[in-house]
Image (spheres, rainbow, N blue to C red):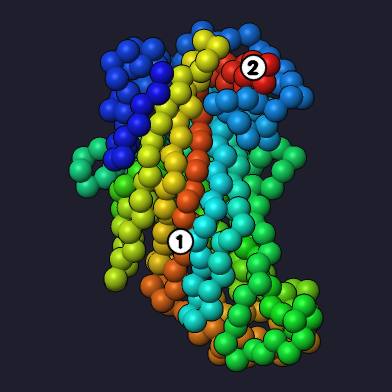
Amino acid sequence: MRTSSPAPRRRLRRLLPTAAVLACAALLSGVTPASASASTPTTAAPGAPYTGMGNCPLAAPAMQNPENLQVGCLVSVTRAGKFTLGSTVVPFNSPITLQFGFYWDKSAPEVSFPDGSTANQYTVVPPTGAPLLSAPMVQISIPGIQNYLPGITSVFAQVELAGPVTKFTPLATGEPYPVFQLPIKLHLYNALFGLHCYVGSDSAPLLLRPTTGATASTPPMTGDPGTLDYAPDPNGHNALAISETRASLVDNTFPVPGASGCGVLGSLNQVINWTMGLPAAAGKDSVSFQQTDATFVLDTDIADLTAALSDSSAH
C-alpha cells in the first residue's frame, strides 16, 4: 500500500492512514517490539523498498546500541543543481550520492517548528565500505583564468566531504529548517593549481544547511519537499520505508573561506580569491540540490532492520 502527498508533514502519525498507524504503532511510540532473530546480511544487494542500502552500517556499534529508540538507513541521489560562488558556477550535471545509517538515542532529541509540530533529529553513522558522499568532477569556468589548452589548462572542481554529517532531520519537510548539516570543501584541479588547491578545508569547511523550506537569509531561497511516499516492509517486518521524490534542497546561509594550497607555496591563492570573490560572508553564495530522490527506512530494532534488508534481497 502506498500513498502520495505534495505537502508532507513531519510527524509519522500524520503521514499515514489509520491502518498504517496501527501497523506501525510501536515504531511511532518509540517502544521497541520483541526483537526479530538476528540475521546476518546476505551478500546480495537489498531489494525494494531498500534498493541502494547495501552499505548501511548495520553492524556498527553505534547502530547496535540496545538503548537506541530508532535506527535507520538512507540513500539519496541528486541529479541536478549547482554551486554558485560569486560568478563561478559549479554545475551538478552528474549524480551526487549520499548514503549513511542513523539512530535516535534514548535522549530522544527533537526539533520544533513554527507551526507547533516536531520532528526527530538523528545521529549519522558513516556507511560501510563506501564513501558517505560521492560527487563527480566537473569542468568549470573561473572568470579571469583563461583556458589556453583545453584538457591541460581547463579547471575542474569536485565537492568533497570535510567532516561528519550532523543533525539529520529527515521529516523537516517544507519547514525553514535544514534536513542535515553537511561540511564540504571544493577541490579545484588545474595544471597550475597543484594537487591540493581547495576552497574550504577540514578545519574551515563550507557548512551547508540545505532545506526544503525557506532559508534564513535575505533574500531567502526556497526549496521544495517534492512528493512523499511510504512503503511498509513487504515481508512483515516492522521497518517502514519513506521516500521523497524530486525534492529541491537549497542553502544560501553559509560563509565561504578563501582558497588555500593553490599554486607553488600558495602563490595562486589570491588570484582565485579575487576571481571568485573570496572569502565571502554568509548570504553571498548559494547551493541548490535539484531533482533529489531520497529513501530512508526506520525501525525500532536493529535486528529487525537487518532482517528486513536481508529478506528483501531474496525478492
Q: Quadrant of residue 44?
A: top right
* Quadrant into which the N terminus falls: top left
310 and 166: which is toward the camera:
310
Which residue is rendered at x = 57% and y = 25% of the image? 48
Q: Is residue 257 left or right of residue 120?
A: right
Q: Which label is found at residue 288?
A: 1
| Residue 250 seen by the camera | yes
Which residue is rendered at x = 72% and y = 80% of the image? 154
Q: Is residue 261 above or below residue 207?
A: below
Distance, label 1 to label 2, CA atoms, is 36 Å
Q: Nearer the viewer, mark 1 or mark 2?
A: 2
The residue type indicated by label 2 comes to: His
Q: Is residue 183 above or below residue 15?
A: below
Which residue is rendered at x = 35% and y = 51% of the image? 224
Q: Secondary structure at mark 2?
A: loop
Q: Is residue 107 above or below residue 89?
A: above
| Residue 204 seen by the camera | no
Q: Is residue 127 left or right of residue 211?
A: right
